[in-house]
């Protein structure tokens, strides 16, 4: 059994940047009288956050979620008027971006570390615990 190393290709950050730029452009260029499209674009920001967390762990998830927050905040403040009481769910969404990025990144990183541990144990001829066996 071989230890699989996570290959970090230069293509992954480019993919994430393209996602972020495209979603932001769609979001900023969509007229405000189409709130259903804004809701869709607001949720599409989770795709690069989750991908970054899966590919790069905790650090990647948090960096991407912070970048998404920075990209989304001007839209919220300037185009929607920044009314805290009227648009509370949009402010909470920014907080949720960061929570999802952190939690997904942490879980992904722990899973990767656990897999490496199990592969080292298996390679050394140790016994793999029953709980660690795949279903």
Image (cartoon, rainbow, N blue to C red):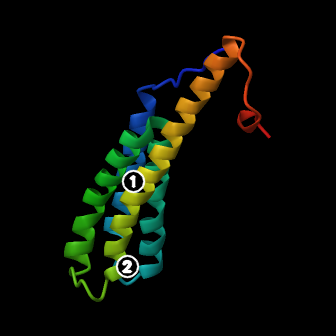
Residue at 42% from the left image edge and 52% from the top image edge: 101
Q: Residue furthest bottom?
A: 86
Left or right: 5, with 130 as reference point: left
Left or right: 34, with 121 as reference point: left
Q: Which residue is mark 1?
A: 22
133 shown above or below 86: above
Q: Label 1 neighbourhood size at 10 Å, few (<14), some (14-19), many (20+)? A: few
Real-space Cα distance between discs 1 and 2?
A: 23 Å
Residue at 46% from the left image edge and 45% from the top image edge: 106
Q: Residue furthest right?
A: 135
At which x and y percent is residue 20?
Answer: 37, 51
Quarter placement of the N terminus: top right
128 shown above or below 110: above
At which x and y percent is residue 46?
Answer: 46, 57
Q: Nearer the viewer, residue 54 or 70?
A: 54
Q: Label 2 neighbourhood size at 10 Å, few (<14), some (14-19), many (20+)? A: few
3 shown above or below 102: above
The quadrant in which residue 71 appears is bottom left
> Looking at the image, how many numbered discs can be counted on the residues?
2
Circle nearer the N terminus (1, 2): 1
62 shown above or below 1: below
Q: Is residue 112 visible?
A: yes
At which x and y percent is residue 16?
Answer: 41, 43
Q: Is residue 1 visible?
A: no
Left or right: 90, with 82 as reference point: right
Q: Which mark, by number, is residue 89?
A: 2
Residue at 26% from the left image edge and 69% from the top image edge: 75
């Amino acid at each position: 059994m071989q230890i699989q190393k996570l290959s970090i290709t230069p293509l992954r950050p480019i993919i994430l940047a393209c996602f972020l730029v495209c979603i932001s452009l769609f979001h900023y260029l969509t007229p405000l009288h189409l709130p259903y499209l804004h809701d869709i674009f607001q949720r599409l920001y989770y795709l690069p956050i989750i991908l970054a967390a899966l590919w790069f762990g905790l650090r990647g998830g948090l960096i991407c979620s912070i970048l998404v927050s920075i990209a989304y905040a001007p839209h919220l403040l300037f185009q929607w008027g920044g009314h805290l009481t009227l648009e509370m769910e949009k402010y909470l969404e920014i907080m949720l971006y960061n929570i999802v990025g952190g939690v997904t990144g942490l879980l992904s990183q722990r899973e990767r570390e656990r897999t490496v541990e199990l592969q080292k144990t298996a390679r050394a001829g140790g016994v793999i615990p029953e709980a660690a066996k795949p279903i």
